[in-house]
Amino acid sequence: ALALIAGAYVTAWLAPRRPMMHAVILGVVALLLALAESTVFWNVLPAWSHVLAILLVLPSAWLGGLLHARPGQRRVVRRNRR
């Protein structure tokens, strides 16, 4: 979960526009990968780890995007005015 929070933070930081949307898209991709991983390794790992991994994916991505969008940390875009 910590790696996904950090990844979503970096994704939001690198996004040219709408950083939260980019962080959530990363969360959806991670959710699809977690579902695929759970189906492949269902008999190898305990069931609670699969359920927990799937439940924590989207909130972790959202939190990473939210950490980037904290007040006082917003990206300032300066435009040349002539």
Image (spheres, helix red, strand yellow):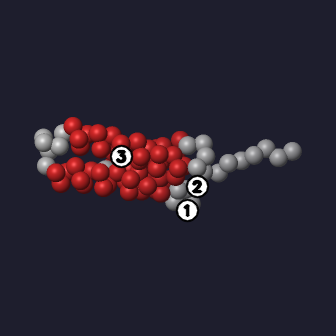
Q: Are marks 3 and 2 in contact (CB under 8 Å)?
A: no
What kind of residue is marked 1?
A: Pro
Q: What is the quadrant of the C terminus in the image?
A: top right
Q: Are marks 1 and 2 in contact (CB under 8 Å)?
A: yes
Residue bearing the label numbered 2: 74
Q: Is residue 38 left or right of residue 10?
A: left
Q: Are marks 3 and 1 in contact (CB under 8 Å)?
A: no
- Please, is residue 13 above or below residue 60 in the view? above
Q: Is residue 37 left or right of residue 70?
A: left
Q: Residue at x 21, y 37 (%)?
A: 40
Image coords of residue 73 (percent x, y): 55, 56
Q: Is residue 4 left or right of residue 43?
A: right
Disc 3 secondary structure class: helix
Residue bearing the label numbered 3: 31
Query: In front: 11, or 52?
Result: 52
The disc placed on residue 71 is: 1
